[in-house]
Amino acid sequence: MPRQLSEVEKAQIVSRIEEGWSIRAVAQLYNRNKKTILKIKQRWEQEDSLKRKIGPGRPKLTNPEQDAAFLGYLRNNPFATVRDAVIDTAFPASQPTASRRVMKSELKCHPAAKKMFLNEERRQSRIIFALNYIYRNPQFWNRVIFTDEKTFQLTYNGQIRVYRPNNTRMEICPEIIRGQVIGNHGVKKR
């Protein structure tokens, strides 16, 4: 299905018809049906307008300013959930509608990066550790046990999600303090 004609194209169609072009020639030029060109001509003659009529669909509950405020909240608070954003911004639509607005935007929901930011100090400490233990024999390494710290909670302690544009995982805002969990434009301390 061809895209809709813009107002500029409709104005060009009307001007070509007024110049003496036939309906068929204009239809071939714009790759449209003759009936479409005829309707544009009749609408111009009757209503003196080329604007598209409002569609019959259900009107949106939100306006562009509310959508921008909602998405701006998620950009500034990437660790917030859609539900939190709906409540804090007084978004007038339901949570599923809010989720659809997020899906249509550039923001995507990703797991937060859990790696510490690798700065020069950490890089040097890793090299020093490797150089200190490079000549140890296999028996030494068989006796080494590495453990991870575990936390237990009675409430949900699932994966932390963050809203950010694609390919911005390790971009960090300079005004944000770095903590243990790093995400785009935000850090959540544990």
Image: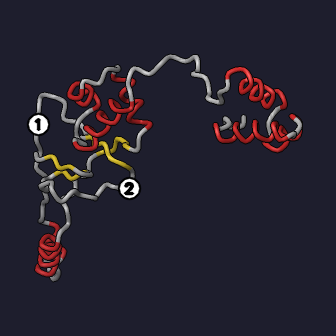
In this orientation, does residue 2 appear? yes
**Residue 121: quarter of image:** bottom left
- Mark number for residue 152? 1
Task: Name the spot of residue 71 as percent of width and height, x first.
Answer: 32, 37
The answer to whether the residues at label 1 and label 2 have Cβ atoms under 8 Å apart is no
How does the figure colour the protein chain or chains? secondary structure
**Residue 47: quarter of image:** top right
In the picture provided, is 171 more to the left or to the right than 63? left
Task: Name the spot of residue 7 as percent of width and height, x first.
Answer: 64, 37
**Residue 101: quarter of image:** top left
Query: What amino acid does circle 1 point to?
Result: Phe
Query: What amino acid does circle 2 point to?
Result: Asn
The residue carrying pointer 2 sits among few (fewer than 14), some (14 to 19) or many (20 or more) residues within 10 Å by Cα, namely: few
User: Which residue is nearer to you in this view: 7 or 58?
Assistant: 7
CA–CA distance between discs 1 and 2?
A: 32 Å
Task: Name the spot of residue 189 as percent of width and height, x first.
Answer: 11, 47
In the picture provided, is 14 more to the left or to the right than 52? right
In this orientation, does residue 139 appear? no
Which residue lies at the image location 19% right of the left edge and 30% below the top edge? 156
Q: Mark 1 or 2 closer to N-term?
A: 1
